[in-house]
Image: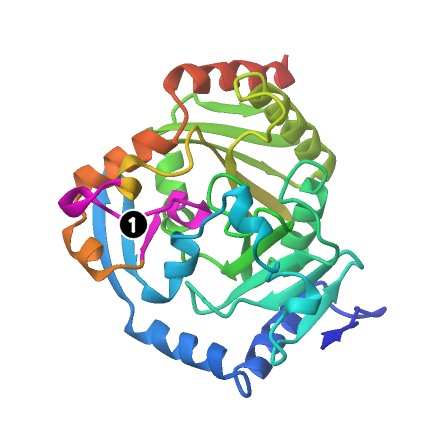
Amino acid sequence: MIFEDKPVKNNSADWWAERTKQLLESEKKYWPLLQINYKNLNNVSTRAFPFDNFEIRVQFNPARIKSSAADISNEAIQSRKCFLCLENLPHEQDGLSYNKHFVILSNPHPIFPEHFTISKRNHSPQTIIGNFEELLDITRDLGKYYTVFYNGPKCGSSAPDHMHFQAVSKNVMPIETDFEKMVSKLEKAVLRNGKIEIRLFEDHLRYFISAESRNKGELLYAFKTFVNAFKKISPPHEEPLMNILASYQEDIWRLIFFPRQKHRPTQFYAESEKSLLISPAAVDMGGLFIVPREEDFEKITRENITDIFRQVTISKEYFEFLRKKIGEIFI
């Protein structure tokens, strides 16, 4: 059942966040698969790898095998029913209608204590272009409790044929808790004009860009500039590879963009002792590697983590190009 709830006048600004939390708590009472997988979260194991002013954690979560190993080839996509289309949802699953275009759904294979999929009602390809403003609105409305993220169709999305975001418990990814320490190392790598602050990070195993503002228009313009520049160094006719983390607090949006050059590292396809079934998406880029096989959890090393980030993030040359183009906003 899709609940056509909507806030009425005099509802607090946190109405959507509260209602989303209620949805999950309700479904935990009667949806067996959800109950089991949330109970199993109590048994996941985590390893921490400290680096300079930040941390990377590895989570052993066998329930994520379908997502990590998902076949996203055109043949595989065309041969299965879309699991995000409303007519194909499990009969136990409820949803919350959001803004006429999206539906908030509890994710039955959670990584965090609260995990949601926010999918478009209509079946349409996964793309952030044309949906970025929706991301800002969703992030604002869920910001009391949740961080929202986007996985590009070729860098982490297991449903590249159906537009969706995800929302998870706030401040549980390492990059969120380490952000201020990372910022302290930036020195002059900050661009600001009084309405928006953009930072470019390059000393944390992967390249990424943050943008913070109270002004939606400034963020829309910055995103347009970023995407147009990224397109110039990406294959033609394809969305540039990216993951995005978005949060909202004290009336300020914080967006973190991870520009990518590759979907999966060589370890994903390797055999025997060199194999690591890791398919980095937004959560992994945010500092939490999801590992569905116990043997990979046991053998992964700092060197593996460093090498995987090196493979999937963009090159220094491309990052400098993006830095130059984004800097033109402030000229």
As for residue 289 lying within the magenta part, the answer is yes
Name the residue rendered at 34%, 51% in the picture: 288
Confirm whether residue 298 shows in the render: yes
**Residue occupying the point 78% across, 58% down:** 99
The residue under label 1 is 277
Task: Depth check: give the residue in front, 281 or 223.
Answer: 281
Residue 317 vs residue 263, the one in the foreground: 263
Residue that protrudes farthest toward the right in the picture: 9
Which residue is painted at 63% across and 79% down in the image? 91
Residue 308: x %, y % from top left: 29, 37
* Percent position of residue 148, x then y: 56, 53
- The C terminus sits in image quarter: top right
Is residue 219 in the magenta section? no
Image label count: 1
- Figure quadrant of residue 133: top right
User: Percent x, y for residue 136?
Assistant: 67, 46
Residue located at (62% from left, 48% from top): 161
Residue 301, above or below 92:
above
Q: Position of residue 12 (x, y in %)?
A: 73, 68
The amino acid at mark 1 is Leu
Q: Secondary structure at mark 1?
A: loop
In the rendered view, tell whether residue 276 sits above or below residue 28. above
Q: Quadrant of the N terminus?
A: bottom right
Report the front residue among 268 and 206: 268
228 left or right of 67 in image: right
Q: Answer with the quarter of the image where residue 270 lies.
A: top left
Residue range (magenta):
270-291
Tell me the crowding category of disc 1: few under 14, some 14 to 19, or many 20 or more residues within 10 angstroms, Cα based: many
